[in-house]
Amino acid sequence: MEAYHLESQKADYPRIVVSQQIRDVIQEIRNTASSLVEIAIHESAIKELNRYLFNDQDGNLCVDYMGKRFFEYMNEATSQSPAIDLHTIVYKAYAHICDEEERFRNEGNNKLFERYARLRSYMDSRLDIWGWGNLTKGHW
């Protein structure tokens, strides 16, 4: 039920919003360590988890699927498969997002235009990570 609410009411554009329950579990893990070793293990795990998350402009904690940690993971995971070109995949995704944003603007569909604009803004903030720092809307 909460997942549906987060997706339908909070996410608003293609993103994964982390629930308050997950935040509470993370905090509980931090608070339950009873030894220095457990504290170190818990803090290390939480630090790694946080590398996959970011606070979006509206204050929601979200999965950072275009962030540095995902880039590192995907680079590592695809390094053995030359058929997968992450650079091209990100380029095509960005071009598609820009095209859809423009299409919905031209059609006067403000709801979808705004969603694509927010998605493009998120990607704009992550393009350097994926090697497309010089890519801007309309210049692909």
Image: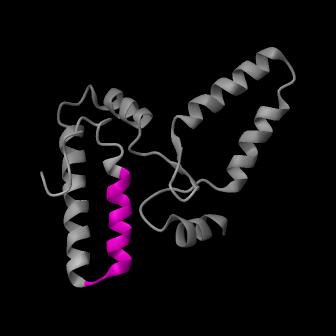
Most foreground residue, 69 or 78:
69
Location of residue 113 with respect to 56 vertically, above or below: below
Q: Quadrant of residue 117?
A: bottom left
Percent position of residue 121, x then y: 35, 55
Percent position of residue 114, x then y: 37, 71
Location of residue 42 with respect to 9 vertically, above or below: above
* Highlighted magenta segment, given as a residue range: 108-122
Is the stretch drawn in magenta largely helix, strand or loop? helix
Asked whether residue 115 is drawn in magenta, I would say yes
Left or right of 139? Residue 15 is right
Percent position of residue 31, x then y: 82, 34
Location of residue 7 with respect to 30 vertically, above or below: below
Most foreground residue, 28 or 120:
120
Percent position of residue 5, x then y: 61, 70
Location of residue 80 with respect to 109 vertically, above or below: above
Left or right of 114? Residue 42 is right
Q: Kindly give the residue lying farthest to the bottom in the view shown.
A: 108
Q: Residue at the location (31% across, 49% down)?
A: 124
Most foreground residue, 100 or 72:
100
Left or right of 32? Residue 43 is left
Q: Kindly give the residue lying farthest to the top in the view shown.
A: 37
Q: Kindly give the residue lying farthest to the left in the view shown.
A: 140
Q: Please count the marks in the image.
A: 0
Left or right of 29? Residue 122 is left
Q: Residue at the location (32% across, 30% down)?
A: 75
Question: Which color scheme does this rendered protein use?
Answer: one colour
Q: Residue at the location (36% across, 46% down)?
A: 125
Q: Quadrant of the N terminus?
A: bottom right
Q: Residue at the location (80% across, 40% down)?
A: 28
Asked whether residue 116 is drawn in magenta, I would say yes
